[in-house]
Image (tube, rainbow, N blue to C red):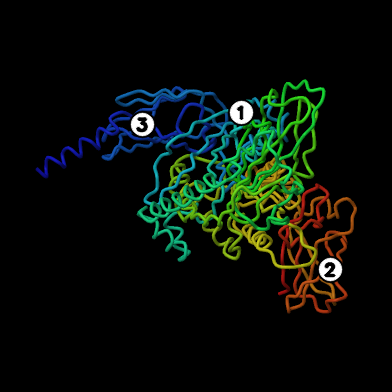
Amino acid sequence: MKKILIFITLIICASSYSQIKLPRLISDGMILQRDIPVKIWGWSSPNEKVEISFNKKKFQTMSSQDGNWTIVLPAQKAGGPYEMILSASNTIALKDILFGDVWLCSGQSNMELPMERVKDKYKDSIAKADNPNIRQFLVPDQYDFAKENVDLSSGEWRSVNPQNILNFSAVAYFFASEIYAKYKIPIGLINSALGGSPAECWISAEAVKKFPEYDAEYQKFKDGKLGTQIEERDRKINTDWYKSVNQQDEGLKNHWSKPDLEDSDWATMNIPGYWADNALGNTNGAVWFRKEVDLSNLKATNAKLILGRIVDADSVYVNGNFVGTTSYMYPPRKYAFDPKFLKEGKNEIAIRVINNTGRGGFVADKPYQLIIDNDSIDLKGSWKYKLGTKMLPLPPQTFIRWKPVGLYNSMIAPLKNYGIKGVLWYQGESSTKKPAEYAALMETLINNWRTEWKQGSFPFLFVQLTNFMDPKTEPGESNWAALRQQQKNILAVPNTGMAVTIDIGEWNDIHPLNKYDVGKRLALQARKVAYGEKNIVSSGPLFKEMEQKGNQLILSFTDVGGGLIAKNNAVLRGFEIAEKDGKFVWANAVIEGNKIKVWSDAVAQPFKVRYAWADNPIEANLFNKEDLPASPFEATLH
């Protein structure tokens, strides 16, 4: 009986690939890496002959006992389109294949963020987007702790056109556009990024052993049981909390969205703002807002509400008609609706806001408007509000997908046979809780990926954290600044490059809209690191070394380009110094040639210097003449 079972199992295993099967990446429209031998791989029946017909030549191999096979094609120049025929017990024809440069684009939400989110800022770019030589493969967001996956569950190659571009990573698209404009070669983008992910998610099980804390955490989740238990618990807690909100909310029970509601007894507050700063205090639950808008000469063909950002979730009504909802705090609220919902005279806008923890309300310095055709009505100012129901804060969720190794196994391991030019990396926001370890984590990640790809030290280009959160008026500690220093330290790893973005963030948005300059600055790094342009200025000033002269520190920099400048001919700002006690004070700073002299009358023996050392260093204005910002830094005399 046992022998029969084994025989049946072998038959099932062999028949699972009775026909040749290809990984998702090897498909119509793919862009393959030029100028290097190219792996084409897949699965078939055991010990089966597999043949590829390509470019008037044939290439053959035999599959292994477990049905795996790989054929290596000789290096090809950039170009195409080509066709490829794969034959075994069945035949697969692949079409529209290009050879060019393939960039793996990874990290967290600022890499993941699609053109859809920035479509209002880049309307012309989207309208004109039509380039079949730039293509993206979007890797599905999945994780697996048990094993390294050999394939992806979904995904296909898509070329740039006004429809497809909305799903492209904005940073990656603008990078690709710059590189294509310069070199006129096809650019493939493998978009494998996930919002909120810390660096340790993207490292293999073997490599993460260098970090005992993360290895121990990975081991806890390896068999999947603990993760399943936690997710089921969190799902129940989350479901019960929102069910209670909906059951208890007086606004839902009594239809506070209807336009003729008697709301004369409602309190008022200014929007944007947080109700914690008003009579409600720091309350969680559901809060309703209402505002009356008077319209005349109404002949609308299009209508839209722009409601900035709301913490955390919202549902919006116009004259009692539901027009849109968003379930979490980060996306901008833009709700197009049928203009028939509007009427001459008084119109009522109602917003139900659910806040599950922290301070709920409307984020400042964002647009709040009713747009009717080409006219806009400012909705900022006084709104009526009333508490629908008060809740205890929702307990924090455990994000299993962010645990070590899981994303590597599911979103990186299936890619490593696919030849690439290099990596674009935008991540770090989720690693700011423990910045001191970041450079070591990233050096491990870079070496891990280079080892697995077996392509040598391919270029690894990354984005330094931008400016974010409230500015501070006095020197102080900052985890975001500390992580930027760690990112600068990563440049010690060979064949890396860093795009500095300290000047293009938004204080109130962890997802700043300016993705064009991020992509452009990554492209400058690529032109130097990956494409070997020797005379290009690819970076703003990077601190090199310093010496002490009396009560002054003399700072030297690399990447000064055409020269150091204080942007807009202003006084140089953002420098602070300290003696050995580490008590930093603001410092005077002047440019002298390609060096900077820094001092303070309050510091007799300067020992340490910092520049742009804050979450949001709004006064940091050191640039080179090529208009590239200096990297923030901290340095100590040796």
- First-in-chain label (3 vs 2): 3
| Mark 3 vs 2: CB contact within 8 A | no
* Nearest to the observer: residue 396 or residue 340: 340
> Which element type, helix, strand or loop, lies under badge 2?
loop
* Residue plotted at (35% across, 28% down): 51
Q: Which mark is residue 160?
A: 1
Task: Name above or below for residue 79 compared with residue 213.
Answer: above
Residue extending farthest to the left is 1
Q: Position of residue 504 (x, y in %)?
A: 74, 48
Please state which of residues 319 and 595 is positioned toward the viewer in this rendering.
Answer: 319
| Residue labelled with disc 3 | 21
Instruction: Decide if residue 524 is in sight here.
Output: no
Give whichever of 575, 42 is nearer the camera.
Answer: 575
* SS assignment at label 3: loop
Q: Give the residue type at disc 1.
A: Val
Rendering coords of residue 632 (x, y %): 73, 59
Q: Is residue 88 left or right of residue 369?
A: left
First in sequence, mark 3 or 1: give its number: 3
Residue 587 numbered tag: 2
